[in-house]
């Protein structure tokens, strides 16, 4: 038992170090001086794929149209919606005829997944120098485009992705969704998204460098020529996690990318019910591990050992264990809670839900079992009425 807790302790110490680095490196986009783009402003297209988004599409489109940037267009693709999305978009076109264009999605070709096909059509519709993709459940602040364009020039990058501030409503949203950010910020040193690790041998940079790529499909901005050179969404047409795969293509081809904290720039409400949450994560959980079953199962075991077993064992060790075993277990639990507290405070979430971290890990354990069962039965996952 002591060996298991030592494994958990080492894991938490390593991930705490990564979290500390990310607290320094993972910064928001800086503000832009007034009139910065008065003389020259490259054209920007904000592209929004929308399928059955009646609950969120109006807020999203209005925020995109209401940009302070002087040279922007908004293009929305209605992807064969069966709810009120088309009617809402038609109303918005009447209100914003000079800025907003709505196109109807064409039938999805064989071999394409829905979102990549929608984004590909959107990109084909535009001629701008910078292409931005945002999800229909997001909303952006008026200075978002100005910040992005300036950051591309200042930091000399070809691709920028933002991690939104997630708006959490229901109990399960508050319990589960923060784990996505916690996992990102405790496992991936974000500095290596921008540059190769100095300790990585030169001959391994091209082969391993793409492993440090990450992206959030809720907000991605590309220089158009780079988007086209890496093959755009066509290059990831069959990938469930197309955002991460596009980021990998950027790095594989030697282009520069950077991730930013989306504080004060973009917000999102991913899911609005426990069922939506379950189905939403179910569709891409295994794909997030590159469909690597060994890695998927190994990480599940490590998460159980680190975040569930110590909490279960702690009260028993208090009465029946040795003092050494109890102290190590207590340190593991304390580090776990501290990590979650830091992430929750960082993103403005209720830190009390950090105390439910083991329950959230258990939720993902249950989801993982369901995903494995689907995989072994060769059962397709559905999202918004389509098989993935």
Image (cartoon, rainbow, N blue to C red):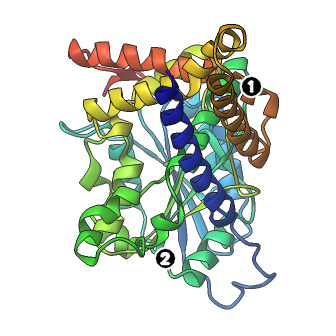
**Label 1: few (<14), some or many (≥20) within 10 Å?**
some
In the visual, does 335 lie left or right of 352? Answer: left
Q: How many marks?
A: 2
Mark sitting on residue 157: 2
Q: Which residue is mark 1?
A: 355
Q: Residue 248: x percent and y percent?
A: 34, 59
Mark sitting on residue 338: none
For numbered disc 2, what is the local secondary structure?
loop
**Label 2: few (<14), some or many (≥20) within 10 Å?**
some
Q: Residue furthest left?
A: 110
Q: Residue 170: x percent and y percent?
A: 72, 20
User: Which residue does the image show at 61% across and 14% down from the upper left?
Assistant: 313
Q: Please state which of residues 122 and 197 is positioned toward the viewer in this rendering.
A: 197
Q: Residue 280: x percent and y percent?
A: 49, 26
Q: Residue furthest bottom?
A: 39
Q: Is 111 rendered above or below residue 22?
A: above
- Residue 65 lies in quadrant: bottom right
Q: Which quarter of the rendering shows the C terminus?
A: top left
User: Which residue does the image show at 56% across and 37% down from the upper left?
Assistant: 9
Q: Residue 144: x percent and y percent?
A: 68, 63
**Residue 218 seen in render:** no
Q: Please state which of residues 242 and 189 is positioned toward the viewer in this rendering.
A: 189
In the visual, does 120 lie left or right of 321? Answer: left
For numbered disc 1, what is the local secondary structure?
helix
User: Which residue does the image show at 36% across and 47% down from the upper left?
Assistant: 242
Q: Is 80 rendered above or below residue 40?
A: above
Q: Earlier in the sequence, mark 2 or mark 1?
A: 2
Q: Is 44 rendered above or below residue 170?
A: below
């Amino acid at each position: 038992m002591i060996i298991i807790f030592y494994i958990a302790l080492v894991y938490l110490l390593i991930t705490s170090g990564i979290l500390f680095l990310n607290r320094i490196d993972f910064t928001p986009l800086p503000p832009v001086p007034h009139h910065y783009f008065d003389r020259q402003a490259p054209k920007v297209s904000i592209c929004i794929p929308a399928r059955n988004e009646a609950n969120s599409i109006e807020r999203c489109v209005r925020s995109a149209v209401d940009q302070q940037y002087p040279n922007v267009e908004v293009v929305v693709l209605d992807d064969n919606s069966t709810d009120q999305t088309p009617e809402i978009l038609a109303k918005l076109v009447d209100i914003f005829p000079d800025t907003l264009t709505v196109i109807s999605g064409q039938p999805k070709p064989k071999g394409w997944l829905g979102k990549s096909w929608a984004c590909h059509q959107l990109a084909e519709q535009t001629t701008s120098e910078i292409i931005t993709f945002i999800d229909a459940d997001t909303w952006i602040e008026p200075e978002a485009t100005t910040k992005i364009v300036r950051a591309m020039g200042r930091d000399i990058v070809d691709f920028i992705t933002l991690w939104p501030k997630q708006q959490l409503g229901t109990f399960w949203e508050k319990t589960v969704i923060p784990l996505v950010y916690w996992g990102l910020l405790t496992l991936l040193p974000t500095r290596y998204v921008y540059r190769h690790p100095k300790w990585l041998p030169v001959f391994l940079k091209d082969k391993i460098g793409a492993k440090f790529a990450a992206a959030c499909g809720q907000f991605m901005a590309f220089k158009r020529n780079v988007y086209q050179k890496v093959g755009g969404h066509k290059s990831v047409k069959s990938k469930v996690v197309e955002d991460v795969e596009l980021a990998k293509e950027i790095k594989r081809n030697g282009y520069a990318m950077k991730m930013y904290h989306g504080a004060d720039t973009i917000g999102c409400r991913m899911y609005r019910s426990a069922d939506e949450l379950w189905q939403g994560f179910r569709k891409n959980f295994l794909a997030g591990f590159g469909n690597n079953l060994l890695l998927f199962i190994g990480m599940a075991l490590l998460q159980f050992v680190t975040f569930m077993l110590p909490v279960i064992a702690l009260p028993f060790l208090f009465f029946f264990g040795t003092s050494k075993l109890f102290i190590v277990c207590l340190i593991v639990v304390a580090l776990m809670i501290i990590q979650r507290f830091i992430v929750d405070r960082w993103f403005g979430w209720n830190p009390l839900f950090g105390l439910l971290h083991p329950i959230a890990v258990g939720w993902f354990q249950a989801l993982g079992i369901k995903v494995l069962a689907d995989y072994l039965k060769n059962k397709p996952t559905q999202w918004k009425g389509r098989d993935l």
